[in-house]
Amino acid sequence: MRPAFRLTVQIAILSVEHEDEHEDEDEDEHEHSASPEGYAVTSSIGGSMHTKRLSFENESGHQLAALLDLPVDDEPIAYALFAHCFTCSKDYKGVARVSRALAAEGVAVLRFDFTGLGESEGDFSDTTFSSNVDDLVAAAIFMEREFEGPKILIGHSLGGAAVLHAAARIPSTAAVATLAAPSSMDHLAGVIRSSRVDIESAGEAEVEIGGRAFKIRKEFLDDLSKVKMLDAISGLGKPLLVCHSPEDRTVGIDNAAEIFAAADHPKCFLSLDSADHLCSNAADARYAGSVIAAWARRYIGQPQEELKQATPGDNRVVVRTDDGYRTEVLANGHSLVADEPLAVGGTNAGPTPYELLASALGACTSITIRMYADRKQWPLDAVVVRLTHEKIHCEDCGEPDRPSSRIDHFTSEISLEGPLDEAQRKRLLAVADRCPVHRTLKGAAEISTTLVDSLERNPRPD
């Protein structure tokens, strides 16, 4: 049996765990510091979704490497298929962040490497735009066989063009979203224009794309010349969300206008404001993913309210920290965000863990008072609880034997609104100190911590 880590909680007015004087200073953990508001800051780890490594075979017999981002409860509201941009891979951070934002909203997302890219088998020089579309169809067939057919198709840049063509061949498709997608192949042809003569005369040539050399063959150019983007868009027949940044210097915003104009309704446009072409900014990628999830619910038969229904008996709170300190929290079907202030390297996208702890104490205090007043039928209109947190020396809270130690100290101010008499007000103040979270912090709590294998480390299935 693994030993449990024990946490002893003490209260001074309203306080939390004091620092362990025997703690190993070499342990790899975050040091807490005080924010300007007086709250201590920390960071948290865990997972509000998890990733499973997979592989599947395309029609040429190559094994294509894939990642499936799953919601924490493994019960997705729908499956999505994500196509990355030209010469990129499934592991590009922008792709991963969009995918994980969807998983946090309950949508499982399969992202994979096209033939000859990333971890997938095959020779990139043998591929064409049409073969990329074929790879997408192969991925959808795999999903249909092993899980569920993708209801949402998402494509970034050239991947956006690919999903617009693949949708007609994937029967499960209910909605399509593109990010920074081109409205024609002119842009891609322009990228390789300087090598076009060499390709046409020699049959192939190396072209530098994004700082890397790729072999492009004449078959690739011939295939591009046959691609009819606007025909595919006008014949899509599916709801379409066009996501694009007006600041995109790689695929201009005019491409989004042409796609939007060619598509039939229902269609929507999402401006990604100052995002670059690759959605390299984490906030931009997560924003795109969360909006795609919210938009798609209308078309996948999953209303927002259903996401908030907890599984009976499931009281897990799950958190995940990826880049930096921004942390996703899933609690009883509700999504929250925790973060650290800018001053300590965070992005201030949400409250700190200590602020969440103070929130839990304040909410429990307020609810306990409300319940008691309702039971007594007292005229309580509202409860307001204001909390602050700081670390103070034990000698300041009546423990002179440990003057150098510090204790976490919460101060709670309660306002009771309504025509209560003095006896009722005093009684409700006493009830406040008996709320469950308060008693947990004053008592002794035990934390059992175990290390489990991440599904991300599982080998691919044979």
Image (cartoon, grey):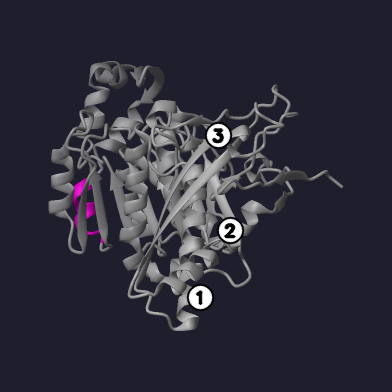
Does any portion of residue 355 appear in the rendered image?
A: yes
Q: Which residues make up the magenta segment?
A: 228-236
Majority SS type along the magenta span: helix
Q: Label 2, on which residue? A: 437
Q: Is residue 230 magenta?
A: yes
Q: Label 3, on which residue? A: 392
Q: Nearer the viewer, residue 196 or 288?
A: 288
Q: Residue at left 39%, top 37%?
A: 37
Which comes before the other along the chain, label 1 or label 3? 1
On screen, residue 460 above or below 301: above
Q: Label 1, on which residue? A: 372
Q: Dot 2: what SS?
A: helix
Q: Give how far across and how far down residue 10 sits, in percent.
A: 66, 46
Q: Amino acid at mark 2?
A: Val
Q: Give how far across and how far down residue 118 sits, in percent.
A: 51, 31
Q: Residue at left 33%, top 73%?
A: 418
Q: Amino acid at mark 1?
A: Tyr
**Alpha carbon separation for disc pair 2 and 3:** 21 Å
